[in-house]
Amino acid sequence: MSETATVIDQYIATRSLATGSEPPIQHVCVVGGGTAGWMSALMLATTSFGPRLKVTVLESPQVGIIGVGEGSTPWLRNFFDVLGIEESEWMPACHATYKSGITFQGWSTKPGFERYFHPFVSMLDNLTMHPFVDNVHARLEGADVAAHPDRFFVAAALARQGRAPRAPANFPFDVWYGYHFDATLLGQFLGRKAVQRGVQHLQRHVEHVQLDERGDISSLRLDGGESLHADFFVDCTGFASLLIGQALKTPFISYSENLFNDAAIALPSAPDAQIESQTVSTALRHGWAWKIPLTQRNGNGYVYSSAHCSADQAETELRQHLALLDADVPARHLKMRVGRMAKIWNRNCVSIGLSQGFIEPLEATALLFVQRTAAMLVEALELGDLGEAAQQRFNDGMRTRFENTRDYIVAHYKTNSRTDTDYWRANAENMALSPSLQGVLMTWMSRQPLAPALRAGRYGQGYPIVSWYALLAGMGIFPDAQDLQPPSAHQARHRLDAVDDFVARSATNFPDHRGLLADIPPRLGDKTLQLYLW
């Protein structure tokens, strides 16, 4: 049995689709390559009727790929698991490294909270989570107890120490990790895999999108005068939104009223001797700089607001930040369109990737949206439910996901305590907040427990409870230090020396990051991640 057939059989086992039924759509054309296009094509080809579904990726040789060195959320692991692709195969090909979480530095000016780590959680955190949350609540009540998140999470220790978040088999505790990778190389790798698994690849440029009398896309006119017909189209054309935006005239909903960044600069630098398993986000004068460690280089960039500084000013600031002011290293300047399409699925077209919308790279959600959207499309195709009601459910679900993610990103900016530039002051003063985000912040500021309302779904959906606690505690959103009082016996009931010892000893079980990357072992199946985080 072929590798493709094995994966398909595994996929069928999770679906209720009757075997032998014909797909409602015979031919899907994915317009645009890159990571979004090839990931979507692979997921479409791995449906329960994959061998009977024709998938074509139409990639223009005239259009470049935006990819600059990217990070992912832990959900990317599932994508490769479903496809049966081992880390030892794809990671070296894409200069990839492991990611335990994200460090934010310089976003807060509050003493002791100038830097914090947003962790990907692990089974081990079940033993330190409750002391962390209890101390957070005690500090909100005015008790002088330690409540900085870095002290309570194994992932933070792994990132600092340059350890990989993959323990050997004799330490059976899984850490929920993501990856860093070269986005261009990942797109190329996925393209090769897709072609091997039956996806057709056509390198042609689209000159015109032809609509039928109902307003659906009927065909694409290519350079040379030929036409390409398909039943369904997936728009992966990036910010150009060639199909969903230009041809189908789908309105775009901007998030610029509460997310000011609309431009970025990318600049590589030499890799460090120690590869830290973390993305670093450093607040600069008019935005923030990323540092993404790859095996061959560091990917760096500056996400900023063009309303607050020019491109030349931003590049100078980034080069100064990297000590590359006089270095002969070219920089790439990028423009970003922040927001989402009013309809992600419009007629016989679904937009995936930058064509559907973009929030910003702060929490590395771009590929997560690709993965989720493609998975929802696969489910709709398998169920054969492509009517207006199904489209509405699809679009409502995507709208909710975008808005929930936007709220979590906006919370970073709203809670910053910098006052050195108009940019940071405008972010802190921003009142264009959704009712959901207002609910999160009002609950925290009123010193009420956040977990019950998050758990009940009243607000703050889209991110785990631990993420909200890490963000708000990490930013130091507590009473001022001079207003804190000695804790009561109950408030000081947790032994932090025991927490420190547990985190430190747990971290010693994880290998050196660079060493593991030189010889990545098989995954041997995935451990079940049982996280009792409320």
Image (cartoon, rainbow, N blue to C red):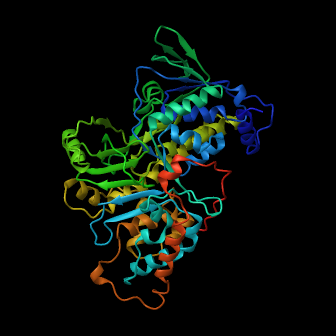
Q: Nearer the viewer, residue 377 or 497?
A: 497
Whether residue 307 can be seen here: no
Picture coordinates of residue 20 (x, y %)? 81, 31
Q: How many marks?
A: 0
- Depicted 323 relative to depicted 467: above or below: above
Measuring 42% from the left and 30% from the top, which residue is drawn there?
65
Which quarter of the figure is the N terminus placed in? top right
Quadrant of the image for the C terminus? bottom right
Q: Which residue lies at the image location 31% right of the left edge and 42% below the top edge? A: 262
Q: Position of residue 320 (x, y in %)?
A: 21, 48
- x%, y% of residue 18? 80, 37
| Residue farthest bottom in this picture | 489
Horizontally, residue 45 falls left or right of residue 488, namely: right
Above or below residue 161? Residue 488 is below
**Is 439 rendered above or below residue 181?**
below
Q: Quadrant of residue 195?
A: top right
Q: Image point 65% across, 63% down: which residue?
A: 170
**Residue 490, can we see it?**
yes
**Left/right of residue 326 with respect to residue 117 in the rendered view:** left
Query: Between residues 151 and 109, which one lies in front from this camera angle?
Result: 151
Q: Position of residue 21 (x, y in %)?
A: 78, 31
